[in-house]
């Protein structure tokens, strides 16, 4: 028997209240003026704002139908972090501060209420069957970016749920995409804070509501150390990255990042005498393959017969694919791989799959990455994977890339096999990855 969906004529939907009771009150008043039948919130009631416990009475009094976001899930279950899915250590630092404040300011009764919230809702608006979620229908904190989420994956979500419209949030940046055949995907955005869309602005009300636009005047943020060259006004700060939950602009006394020139893809590190010796060896192996083969025959490589063969459970065109590389790729803001240890570095780095190329570099002295310095796709084919997803050949692209240094020896081998690799495997599963493409250097 077909599922009976509650039907509405007109609804209001928003996400990301973020402890901002003032923004919530204004949103609800605006919704009432628009003559809607129902109001829906797609989660993340806590975080960042000053008054955690003030948002719940407003929501319940207005009869808002609320979904559970990752923040709400963490508060309800007593977790130690928000489960936001950040990859930048600075974002995680400030997120922990915000989460601890929110947890301490949220009453046990409200935390218990958060635990009762559903993670999905299905309704009907006219002829459209609507599926609502926080991050994605499959993962509560999945980032569905407009720039990198393939239409094929969105259509797969709708097909699986027998829906025509997908409404989500979590990224904090609103967008809409028509998928054809009457299908649509919409990120409804957030109300508790401005979008981190690459612009940095300060909104102030110096006239108490008087003046043009109610006295609300957006102004670009300026550096504190403004000098005489710019009339004491300072240069505009650049937003650190394009993460929607970027917690701060550039840190004090940290120079604003410059725009990367179109042809400048990766920064090549300076050459030391030790690096020069390694590069000579790399070039010898490259130009005299027999020399590399002779070296390889003398090496004792690790063989493992304990890893079970795991066949893919569904077609590749329906599977989310992740990238793992041993090319020493990392973000410039992250610590480089350790080149001083002759046995290598068994750690890993996390790179958001949509990270701007100008923020990514390579630290690795054991192979010739000059071609990859010009085009990162040589060792990390992110663009090609997105093209395959857009063409429907793969179901989707996992949100994060995991990078290793492909030179690990000695005692580090055990660390790699027993600690680092299992941790990356756990993270890949949490990212929703169903298959992995490994790109060795």
Image (tube, rainbow, N blue to C red):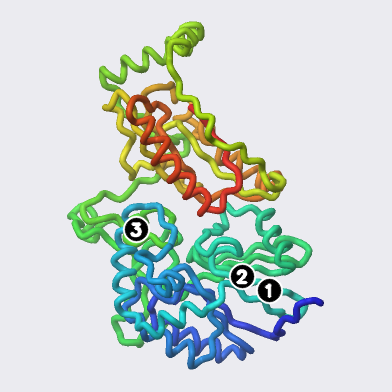
Q: Which quadrant: the N terminus?
A: bottom right
- Label 2 packing within 10 angstroms: few (<14), some (14-19), many (20+): many
| Rendered residue at 73%/69% (across/down) | 164
Point 61% across, 67% down: residue: 186
Q: Earlier in the sequence, mark 1 or mark 2?
A: 1
Q: Nearer the viewer, mark 3 or mark 2?
A: 3
| Left or right of 130, for residue 226 | left
Mark 1 or mark 3, earlier in chain: 3
The answer to whether 286 is drawn above or below residue 137 in the figure is above
Which callout, 3 or 2, points at the residue further toward the start of the chain? 3
- Relative to the observer, which residue lies in front, 315 or 354? 315
Left or right, 124 with respect to 438, comes to: right
Q: Mark 3 points at which residue?
A: 92
Q: Nearer the viewer, residue 163 or 180?
A: 163
- Say which residue label 2 marks: 167
Image coords of residue 272 (percent x, y):
26, 21
Q: Which residue is drawn at the image coordinates 45% and 24% (left, top)?
A: 302
> Dot 1, crowdedness within 10 Å: few (<14), some or many (≥20)?
many
Question: Which residue has dot 1 on it?
Answer: 130
């Amino acid at each position: 028997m077909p599922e009976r969906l509650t039907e509405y004529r007109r609804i209001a939907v928003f996400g990301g209240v973020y402890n901002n009771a003032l923004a919530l009150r204004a949103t609800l008043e605006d919704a009432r003026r628009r003559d809607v039948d129902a109001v829906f919130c797609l989660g993340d009631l806590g975080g960042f704002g000053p008054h955690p416990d003030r948002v719940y009475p407003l929501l319940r009094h207005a009869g808002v139908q609320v979904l559970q976001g990752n923040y709400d899930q963490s508060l309800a279950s007593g977790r130690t972090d928000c489960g936001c899915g950040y990859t930048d250590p600075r974002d995680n630092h400030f997120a922990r501060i915000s989460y601890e404040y929110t947890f301490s300011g949220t009453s046990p009764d409200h935390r218990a209420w958060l635990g009762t919230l559903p993670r999905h809702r299905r309704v009907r608006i006219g002829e459209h069957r609507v599926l609502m979620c926080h991050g994605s229908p499959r993962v509560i904190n999945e980032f569905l970016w407009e720039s990198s989420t393939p239409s094929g994956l969105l259509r797969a979500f709708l097909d699986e749920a027998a829906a025509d419209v997908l409404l989500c949030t979590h990224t904090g940046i609103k967008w809409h995409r028509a998928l054809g055949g009457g299908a649509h995907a919409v990120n409804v955005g957030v109300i508790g804070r401005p979008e981190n869309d690459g612009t940095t602005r300060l909104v102030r009300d110096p006239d108490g509501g008087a003046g043009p636009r109610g006295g609300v005047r957006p102004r670009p943020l300026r550096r504190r150390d403004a000098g005489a060259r710019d009339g004491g006004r300072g240069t505009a700060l650049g937003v650190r990255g394009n993460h929607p939950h970027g917690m701060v602009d550039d840190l004090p006394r940290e120079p604003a990042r410059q725009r990367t020139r179109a042809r400048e893809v990766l920064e090549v590190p300076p050459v030391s005498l030790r690096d020069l010796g390694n590069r000579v060896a790399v070039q010898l192996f490259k130009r005299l393959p027999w020399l590399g083969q002779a070296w390889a025959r003398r090496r004792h490589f690790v063989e493992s017969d304990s890893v079970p063969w795991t066949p893919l459970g569904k077609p590749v065109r329906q599977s989310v694919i992740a990238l793992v590389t041993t090319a020493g790729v990392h973000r410039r803001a992250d610590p480089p791989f350790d080149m001083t240890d002759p046995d290598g570095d068994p750690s890993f780095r996390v790179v958001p799959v949509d990270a701007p190329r100008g923020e990514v570099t390579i630290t690795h002295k054991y192979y010739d990455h000059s071609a990859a310095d010009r085009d990162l796709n040589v060792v990390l084919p992110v663009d090609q994977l997105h093209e395959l997803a857009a063409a429907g050949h793969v179901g989707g692209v996992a949100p994060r890339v995991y990078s290793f240094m492909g030179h690990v020896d000695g005692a580090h081998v055990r660390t790699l096999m027993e600690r680092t690799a299992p941790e990356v495997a756990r993270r890949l599963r949490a990212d929703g990855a169903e298959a992995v493409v490994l790109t060795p250097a």
